[in-house]
Image: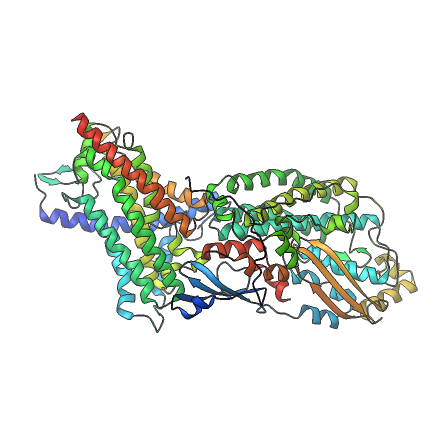
């Protein structure tokens, strides 16, 4: 049964706003959790438990004067954060968060867009999003930003390879590139993190690198490159880069849940989206935890790790999975 | 995470750049190429301690040229001290190196005392040693926190500062100030040790070894930390000596030299402590030296706490030391001495003296010349940070940008002391 077009439209509007709220509270959660892990309180001034802190930050960022270096390439400089932000938001459209419902006599899907090549779409959007960081750093005409861009180029491009290869096993087992089919397959058989454990590990490492979170936060290593590619950005333009980064984190966490942890499946089926949210929450918290505990890798170590460890593991995993799938069927 | 480990190996021969030992110059081939990017790290940069400016030539991520520019924090401490009476000049000393304040205060006071030939009561001597060691732990904690922060281990900073705060609490308890205490007075201590200090300090002594265990468990078993520090920023034994290094940098390069043992001052010859020495000469060795020094400092504090003698806390020399408060109302002479010391200051016999102590950063020297008047004629500090900074270029061979940060961090320079 197909969804009526205006339902999709309403759903898209709702989900985009939900994602923005989720992003806002991910920053809150990160600061709160980091604070607790580091013997401090984290934000606690704006509202109860600092719950209004994200909005205070937003107002501050929006009201800031958006000045930029006179040497910057203006149009590219302005377009870069928008590109980052757009691709980050768009990628979430294909992630299924529920089984689909029947409300009155309309059918409502559990995702915004049911695309048959959803997985490829997500990676394609991610690849475009990288341009935001690369172009933004280059257009700033600043040395630190340029260094950050160079690192971004190298890091994101090389880890994208591992990221894509790591999910190949899941695609083979789910026999589809459609995320809904993959989740349904997991519901019918077994959550894929058990047979695809190696794939999951590679995916997680590559995912941290893709979202440039510690210990792979080299593109914006604050102690080395000041702020990396967004050194020359301020106000809400900087805010857009940050938003993109956190939404990428949420999207990729959601993707990990979808591909390896059975998506919306859980003990009590009608609570689908709740299970989905809980799983994503666990992932996001784990990444915050990682940030609190490990030092940053060096550039050459990062590259070595990506090409010499992750890529072979992902490749071998994909080949073995393929052989097993053929053998079983 | 099996990143191919490279055995830390110290190099043969000398790596000190010539003609200027502290400047790594571009090779001619690179100078004529278009591939080198010159970047200013600092004076306002998130990772430089204070206002160090490094002019770095980068070939991709590799550091191919380096020159440190110092002087942004020059405050003229030494010249200022010449304008003040001996009494007031003491307050300037701790502000030079604001992280190892107590040791700076100590070295100046010791220099003045050496000129005066004054006998310091044992209670003051032991208490000075105790506070100097507490200050060493404080300094190393600040170093560990910031160095780990620079390598991306952000939580370490807060854990270190938690214990650092306990040390500052102890200083506050003793002197009323958390930093720059001015508790060391020519002739002894400014006041007697307050009751309650011993209990609090004993609690700290009990707590600190566990805290150090925690730090080590957080970074020492972390593969990334080891990868980032081992074999990085090599400085050989011969180069370290040639560059005049001291303190943890020297001991990290395999030279067994510690002024506390080589030329014992205070009561260091009466306490039992080990001098950690590591042969590797890399960032990791310097880190290990500092960690073990913290443990040894805790042991010294513990011993000093148990064996601290009673009696007077300041020498009874009315020409130099303020008379007790209650005598001012009964004794005319005391009142006159008090007035003279407070207004004019005491006079120090003519002469010159150089006194060294082992500060957390190495050999901290104080050269003082007196013309017999109430003010120092010349004060000069031998700042270990400044000397350590000269090793930057030597350590920076085959380093990447990220190593640059680790190396500068491992040398533990305090810009206040470098620029004075």
Q: What residue lies at 84% left-to-right and 60% top-to-bottom?
A: B321
- Quadrant of residue B196 in the image? top right
Mark count = 0
Front residue (pair B72, A300): A300
Residue B66: % across, % down: 51, 64
**Which quarter of the rendered picture does the C terminus of chain A lie within?**
top left
- Quadrant of residue A192 in the image? top left
Residue A257: % across, % down: 27, 38
Front residue (pair B62, A256): B62
Residue A274: % across, % down: 27, 37
- Quadrant of residue A115 in the image? top left
Relative vertical location of residue B284 with respect to residue A265 in this rendering, above or below? below
Front residue (pair B18, B106): B18
Q: Is residue B284 left or right of residue A1?
A: right
Residue B197: % across, % down: 72, 45
Q: What residue lies at 37% left-to-right and 57% top-to-bottom?
A: A57
Q: Is residue B414 something that shows in the picture?
A: no
Q: Is residue B126 left or right of residue B47?
A: right
**Which quarter of the rendered picture does the N terminus of chain A lie within?**
top left
Relative vertical location of residue B26 with respect to residue A184 in this rendering, above or below? below
Q: What residue lies at 54% left-to-right and 53% top-to-bottom?
A: B233
Q: Is residue B339 left or right of residue A230?
A: right
Front residue (pair A144, A241): A144
């Amino acid at each position: 049964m197909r969804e009526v077009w205006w339902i999709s439209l309403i759903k898209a509007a709702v989900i985009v706003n939900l994602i923005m709220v989720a992003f806002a509270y991910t920053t809150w959660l990160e600061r709160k959790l980091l604070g607790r892990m580091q013997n401090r309180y984290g934000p606690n001034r704006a509202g109860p438990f600092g719950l209004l802190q994200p909005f205070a930050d937003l107002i501050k960022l929006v009201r800031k004067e958006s000045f930029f270096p006179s040497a910057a390439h203006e149009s590219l400089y302005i377009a870069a954060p928008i590109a980052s932000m757009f691709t980050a938001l768009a990628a979430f459209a294909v992630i299924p968060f529920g089984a689909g419902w029947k409300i009155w006599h309309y059918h409502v899907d559990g995702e915004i867009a049911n695309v048959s090549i959803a997985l490829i779409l997500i990676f394609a959007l991610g690849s475009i999003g990288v341009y935001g960081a690369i172009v933004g750093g280059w257009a700033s005409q600043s040395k630190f930003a340029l260094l950050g861009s160079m690192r971004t180029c190298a890091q994101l491009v090389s880890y994208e390879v591992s990221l894509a290869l790591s999910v190949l096993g899941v695609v083979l087992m789910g026999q589809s590139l459609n995320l809904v089919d993959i989740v349904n397959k997991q519901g019918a058989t077994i959550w894929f993190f058990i047979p695809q454990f190696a794939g999951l590990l590679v995916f997680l490492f590559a995912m941290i690198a893709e979202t440039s979170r510690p210990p792979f936060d080299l593109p914006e290593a604050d102690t080395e490159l000041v702020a990396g590619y967004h050194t020359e950005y301020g106000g809400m333009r900087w805010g857009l880069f940050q938003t993109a980064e956190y939404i990428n984190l949420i999207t990729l966490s959601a993707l990990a849940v979808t591909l390896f942890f059975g998506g919306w499946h859980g003990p009590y089926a009608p609570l689908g989206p709740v299970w989905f949210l809980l799983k994503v929450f666990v992932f996001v918290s784990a990444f915050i935890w990682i940030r609190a505990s490990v030092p940053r890798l060096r550039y050459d170590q990062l590259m070595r790790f990506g090409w010499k460890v992750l890529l072979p593991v992902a490749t071998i995993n994909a080949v073995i999975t393929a052989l097993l799938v053929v053998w079983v069927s | 995470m099996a990143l191919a480990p490279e055995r830390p190996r110290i190099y043969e021969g000398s790596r000190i750049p010539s003609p200027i030992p502290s400047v790594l110059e571009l090779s001619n081939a690179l100078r004529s190429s278009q591939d080198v990017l010159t970047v200013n790290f600092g004076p306002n940069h998130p990772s430089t301690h204070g206002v160090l400016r490094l002019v770095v030539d980068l070939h991709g991520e590799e550091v191919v040229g380096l020159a440190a520019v110092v002087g942004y924090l020059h405050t003229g401490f030494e010249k200022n001290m010449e304008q003040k009476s001996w009494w007031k000049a003491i307050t300037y000393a701790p502000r030079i190196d604001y992280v190892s304040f107590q040791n700076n205060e100590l070295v100046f006071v010791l220099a003045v005392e050496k000129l005066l030939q004054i006998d310091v009561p044992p209670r003051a001597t032991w208490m000075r040693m105790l506070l100097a060691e507490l200050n060493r732990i404080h300094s190393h904690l600040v170093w560990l926190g910031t160095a780990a922060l620079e390598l991306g281990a952000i939580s370490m900073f807060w854990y270190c500062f938690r214990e650092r705060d306990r040390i500052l609490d102890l200083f506050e308890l003793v002197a009323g100030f958390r930093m720059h205490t001015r508790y060391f007075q020519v002739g002894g201590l400014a006041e007697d040790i307050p009751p309650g200090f011993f209990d609090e300090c004993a609690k700290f002594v009990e707590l600190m070894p566990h805290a150090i265990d925690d730090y080590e468990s957080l970074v020492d078993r972390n593969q990334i930390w080891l990868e980032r520090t081992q074999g990085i920023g090599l400085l050989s034994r011969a180069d370290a000596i040639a560059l005049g290094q001291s303190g943890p940098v020297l001991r990290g390069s395999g030279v067994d030299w510690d002024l506390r043992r080589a030329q014992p001052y205070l009561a260091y010859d009466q306490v039992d402590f080990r001098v950690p020495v590591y042969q590797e000469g890399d960032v990791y060795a310097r880190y290990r030296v500092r960690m073990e020094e913290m443990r040894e400092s805790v042991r010294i504090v513990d011993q000093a706490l148990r064996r601290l003698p009673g009696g007077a806390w300041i020498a009874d020399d009315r020409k130099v030391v303020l008379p007790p408060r209650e005598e001012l109302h009964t004794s005319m002479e005391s009142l006159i001495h008090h007035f003279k010391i407070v207004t004019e200051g005491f006079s120090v016999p003519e002469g010159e003296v150089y006194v060294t102590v082992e500060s957390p950063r190495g050999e901290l020297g104080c050269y003082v010349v007196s013309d017999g008047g109430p003010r120092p004629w010349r004060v000069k500090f031998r700042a270990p940070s400044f000397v350590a900074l000269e090793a930057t270029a030597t350590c920076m061979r085959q380093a990447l940008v990220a190593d640059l940060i680790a190396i500068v961090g491992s040398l533990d320079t305090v810009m206040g002391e470098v620029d004075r």
